[in-house]
Image (cartoon, rainbow, N blue to C red):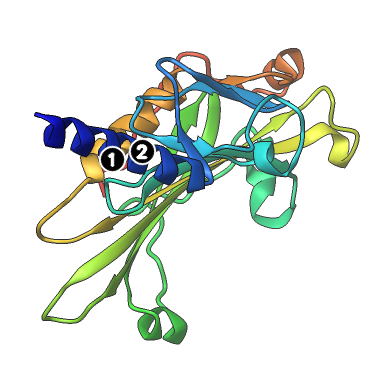
Amino acid sequence: MKTAHYTLILIVISFLIASCGSPYRLTNPNEIVQNKDISFVSPNTQFQIDKEYSSPKDNIHNKQLRLIDFNKRGMQFKIYTSSYGGFNQKKFFKKNARYNESGINYEAKFTKNNKETGVTYRKSWATYINGLKCQGGVFSRGFGGSYAPKSLKFYSISCGYYDTTEVNNNGKRILEIDYRYTYSPEADYEQELKYAVKKAISTLKIKNMDIPRMRREGLLHPNRKFESTKW
């Protein structure tokens, strides 16, 4: 009996030491994750966040709100905002802009670098988040060869909006959502990851969006809902 008791104590101590040594902590039930620009509810308590994350202050740990599930082969996502970069982001601020959608008006061109780094495909789709029309993209990168075939799937979504606190670029700001996981024949967490991201997006709030201006310029689509990619 004493042996079992001591074993239990050792297990608890080992767990506490491992927890103290990790730079991450588990999210709390229904924890609101936020920075100065956005907020969302963590989709479940399996995800972990940087221990340095603490408040909405604009510091290095809070700019990119990254959640990781270490039990699911690096399944993770991050939601953040960035400065307007021009060029490919111009369409976010044009009412009738054309968005890339695979199978409709866009097919990816593979470069030599794509082949050398194992990129097996690229796809694009248009979707909506908080009434914003957004550009989504996904690509898969294979590795491991025929003996241990695996791949990394990377998803990204970008949306543009006018921010009432942005002093540069005529108030333009970009919402970014990146998510990824490692695929193997034994474990495919794609649907689980997509569900977690969709759940987080359903609670997403953009704090400083200039809604009247977005409406005036025809950039707000309040009745459109987020749809994930089929790829």
| Amino acid type, callout 2 | Ile
Q: Position of residue 86 (x, y in %)?
A: 74, 52
| Amino acid type, callout 1 | Leu
Query: Is residue 24 rendered to the left or right of residue 121?
Result: right
Q: Position of residue 223 (x, y in %)?
A: 46, 14
Above or below for 94 versus 107: above
| Crowding at mark 2 (Cα within 10 Å: few <14, some 14-19, many 20+) | few
| SS label for mark 1 | helix
Q: Are marks 1 and 2 in contact (CB under 8 Å)?
A: yes
Query: Is residue 15 rendered to the left or right of residue 65?
Result: left
For the point 73% across and 37% down, the residue is: 173
Q: Quadrant of residue 6?
A: top left
Q: Position of residue 183 (x, y in %)?
A: 23, 58
Query: Is residue 184 rendered to the left or right of residue 22?
Result: left
| Crowding at mark 1 (Cα within 10 Å: few <14, some 14-19, many 20+) | few
Q: CA distance from mark 1 to mark 2?
A: 5 Å
Q: Position of residue 55 (x, y in %)?
A: 68, 24
Residue located beneath label 2 in the image: 13
Query: Is residue 195 rendered to the left or right of residue 50?
Result: left
| SS label for mark 2 | helix
For the point 63% across and 34% down, the residue is: 53
Above or below for 109 versus 106: below
Residue located beneath label 1 in the image: 10
Q: Residue furthest front?
A: 2
